């Protein structure tokens, strides 16, 4: 069968698909080009860049499976695909370690001014006094929104650093980790660091708005390596400017690539930013490629 891969996967994953007897085409396509070509394929594999909405699904008359190399499925109209008998598969655990490590990296960056002192020293400055009031992660309380695969990996690393970990997850009711499961408001009230590991559900809207910031401790640090839209960026900027939020580490944004309207947040001195690279490690991409190949192969068999 013919498989179209629009956002790329690892060589190992592509080879697995070919070894299983499938014809694999890897090509970056515009939305218009995707609509023109999708009718020739039985399977489509994407990452986060390609949007698979109703028009793509309706035009893909041969489609049997849509694979998403990654965790979230917000760029795929899952309900419409399933209603047409098309299987939708993803790789929820493959990039968990990579994303968790980036979340921890952002915690270190903003706690010790790594993001901004690095830039200023390259300009010839020596901002030792300005950045002499960093904070340690050890002994602090990390509040997690979401205790799925990525949340658990983040908790493991935080516990290893001597942090206390509390978490809110409406689905998870028990855990074998040294993590206290509690309410959303309890996490907001007691966390020194808040890290999001949740999907963005468009119908439910953002998880963190001005109302949630108001419930947080003064000087809280927010980390978002989950999904753009889970935090209202304007409300975050207001909270940073007021000092309610000490700092933020952000890997995901409401608009990607970011627009002119987001520049005030991107350039805020208390914000560490990365361009949606949570899963972008050699090891993580290798696991994603192999796992999505396995799932697509299995789905095509059935």
Image (spheres, grey):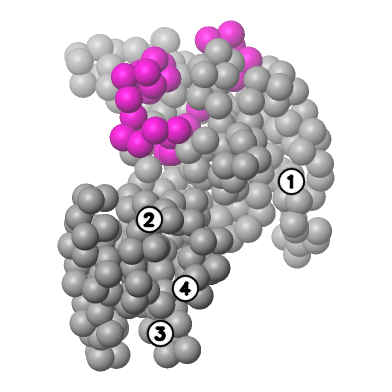
The residue beneath circle 3 is: 300
- Disc with the residue nearer the chain's start (4 vs 1): 4
One can see residue 248 in this view: yes
Horizontally, residue 271 falls left or right of residue 44, namely right
Kind of element beneath mark 2: helix
- At 44% from the left and 46% from the top, the residue drawn is 102
Kind of element beneath mark 1: strand
Which span of residues is magenta-colored?
A: 241-268
- How far is disc 2 from disc 3 in space, using C-alphas? 22 Å
Horizontally, residue 207 falls left or right of residue 4, namely right
Is residue 14 on the magenta stretch? no
- Crowding at dot 2, Cα within 10 Å, few <14 / some 14-19 / many 20+, comes out as few
- Crowding at dot 4, Cα within 10 Å, few <14 / some 14-19 / many 20+, comes out as many
Please name which of the two marks, 4 or 1, marks the residue nearer to the observer.
Answer: 4
Kind of element beneath mark 4: loop
Is residue 261 on the magenta stretch? yes
- How far is disc 4 from disc 1 in space, using C-alphas? 33 Å
Q: Which mark is residue 86?
A: 4
């Amino acid at each position: 069968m013919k498989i179209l891969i629009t956002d790329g996967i690892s060589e190992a994953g592509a080879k697995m698909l070919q070894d299983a007897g499938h014809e694999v085409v890897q090509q970056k396509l515009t939305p218009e080009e995707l609509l023109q070509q999708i009718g020739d394929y039985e399977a489509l594999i994407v990452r986060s860049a390609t949007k698979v909405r109703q028009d793509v699904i309706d035009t893909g008359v041969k489609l049997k499976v849509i694979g998403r190399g990654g965790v979230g499925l917000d760029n795929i109209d899952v309900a419409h695909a399933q209603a047409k008998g098309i299987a939708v598969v993803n790789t929820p655990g493959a990039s968990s370690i990579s994303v968790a490590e980036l979340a921890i990296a952002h915690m270190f960056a903003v706690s010790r001014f790594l993001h901004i002192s690095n830039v200023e020293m390259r300009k010839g400055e020596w901002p030792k006094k300005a950045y002499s009031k960093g904070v340690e992660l050890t002994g602090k309380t990390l509040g997690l929104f979401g205790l799925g695969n990525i949340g658990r990996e983040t908790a493991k690393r935080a516990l290893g650093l001597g942090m206390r970990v509390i978490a809110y997850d409406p689905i998870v009711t028990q855990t074998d980790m040294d993590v206290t499961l509690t309410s959303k408001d309890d996490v907001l009230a007691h966390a020194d660091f808040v890290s999001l590991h949740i999907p963005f559900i468009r119908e439910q809207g953002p998880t963190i708005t001005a109302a949630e910031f108001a419930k947080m401790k003064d000087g809280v640090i927010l980390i978002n390596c989950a999904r753009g839209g889970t935090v209202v960026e304007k409300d975050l900027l207001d909270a940073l400017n007021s000092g309610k939020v000490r700092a933020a580490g952000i890997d995901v944004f409401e608009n990607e690539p970011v627009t002119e309207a987001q520049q005030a947040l991107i350039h805020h001195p208390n914000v560490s930013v990365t361009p949606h690279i949570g899963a972008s490690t050699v090891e993580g991409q290798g696991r994603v490629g192999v796992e999505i190949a396995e799932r697509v192969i299995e789905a095509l068999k059935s």
